Image (spheres, helix red, strand yellow):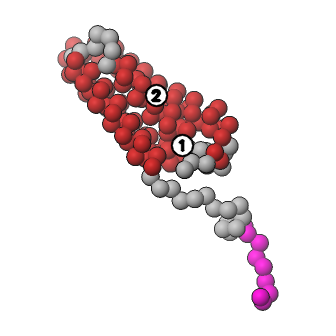
Amino acid sequence: MIRAGTLIKGGTAAESLLVALPTGINAAWLAAATGIGFTLVAQNTAATLASPEAGAVLLGGVVAGACYAVPMFLGRSAALGLGYGAATCWACFGMTKGDSPQVVKDVATYGGYLVAVVSAAALMRPRPPPPADGLLSSEAPKRGGSV
């Protein structure tokens, strides 16, 4: 179970919802926008890179990056990792609609599922509990004498 204070290491639930979650969502949208930007540059510079297959490979790279980033972000903050994973899944879902080539839609479909599974698995990964304040730290007061 996730306690509110552990959503950001040392943070509060408000910090998680107001800082970490929007940061994760923003980071994922920026990754998706970067992929779209690379596709637009490729269309204008090299016709071989503007094929549907090249777009699918680029989308696969964005998905692979998310599969790497989500567990890293979840290690820092549950809200940050969930925001990044959810926004990546939503971006993949958006790619399945509209007039995208079928190969891109296929990568988006399976990529969205893959990011969701990786996010869920990373969220369920056991984490060590945070140490009690001052009891396990090196700054804990030393007590002398016999008991």
Task: Specify few, some or many for label 2: CA neighbours under 10 Å numbering under 14, 14-19, or 20 or more.
Answer: many
Q: Residue 89: name its quadrant.
A: top left
**Which mark, by number, is residue 87?**
2
Task: Specify few, some or many for label 1: CA neighbours under 10 Å numbering under 14, 14-19, or 20 or more.
Answer: many
Residue at the image point whose x is 40% and y is 46% from the top: 121
* SS of the residue under disc 1: helix
Q: Is residue 142 magenta?
A: yes
Looking at the image, tell me whether mark 1 or mark 2 is earlier in sequence order.
Answer: 1
State which region is magenta.
Answer: 139-147
Residue type at numbered disc 2: Ala
- Residue 42 at what x, y percent from top left? 29, 17
**Which mark, by number, is residue 78?**
1
Q: Residue 45: name its quadrant.
A: top left
Residue 34 visible within the image = no
- Residue 86 at what x, y percent from top left? 46, 31
- Residue 102 in the image: above or below residue 28: above
For the residue pair 36 and 4, the one nearer the viewer reads as 4
Q: Residue furthest front?
A: 1
Residue at the image point whose x is 52% and y is 27% from the top: 26
Most frequent secondary structure within the magenta stretch: loop
- Residue 106 at what x, y percent from top left? 24, 24
- Residue 77 in the image: above or below residue 98: below
Q: Residue furthest bottom?
A: 146
Residue type at numbered disc 1: Ala
Q: Is residue 131 magenta?
A: no
Q: Separation of disc 1 and disc 2 at Cα?
A: 14 Å
Residue 105 visible within the image = yes
- Residue 41 in the image: above or below residue 112: above
- Residue 6 at what x, y percent from top left? 61, 49
Q: Is residue 139 left or right of residue 100?
A: right
